[in-house]
Image (tube, grey):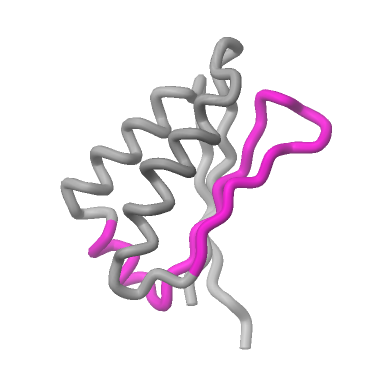
């Protein structure tokens, strides 16, 4: 299993929009993909402008298949629009 942690650093005026975009667009789109395992949007307890998007897929090839879709481009751009910057870290589940 591959797990991505995407640290989202929001624009100062983002407000609740990232959570709405996640709930209404991103999560429904990604959860329908082959190999999808889980997704969560975590709000920092100490920094209102920092979220962590946690995405899990059964394998890296299936995750890359999702990333290559037009739907991914559409919903990711919607999420990214709320961000001043973001950083991605990829992990594999240790067995």
49 to the left or right of 3: right
The residue at the point 55 percent across, 65 percent down is: 91
Q: Nearer the viewer, residue 43 or 5?
A: 43
Magenta region includes residue 55: yes
Q: Name, please, the residue furthest toward the bottom.
A: 95
Q: Nearer the viewer, residue 13 or 6?
A: 13
Q: Quadrant of residue 61?
A: bottom left
User: Which residue is outermost to the top?
Assistant: 13
Q: Is residue 5 above or below residue 14?
A: below
Residue bounds of the magenta highlight: 38-66
Q: Is residue 34 above or below residue 48?
A: below
Picture residue at 54% right of the left edge, 52% below the top:
89
Q: Residue at x 50, y 46 (%)?
A: 88
User: Residue reaching furthest right?
Assistant: 46
**Viewed as shown, does residue 2 lie left or right of 45?**
left
- Quarter of the image where the C terminus is located: bottom right
Give the percent coordinates (x, y) of residue 54.
56, 55
State yes or no: residue 90 in magenta. Answer: no
């Amino acid at each position: 299993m591959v797990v991505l942690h995407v640290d989202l650093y929001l624009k100062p005026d983002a407000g609740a929009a990232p959570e709405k975009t996640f709930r209404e667009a991103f999560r429904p789109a990604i959860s329908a993909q082959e190999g999808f395992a889980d997704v969560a949007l975590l709000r920092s307890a100490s920094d209102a402008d920092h979220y962590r998007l946690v995405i899990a897929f059964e394998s890296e090839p299936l995750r890359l298949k999702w990333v290559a879709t037009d739907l991914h481009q559409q919903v990711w751009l919607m999420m990214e629009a709320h961000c001043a910057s973001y950083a991605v870290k990829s992990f594999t589940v240790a067995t």
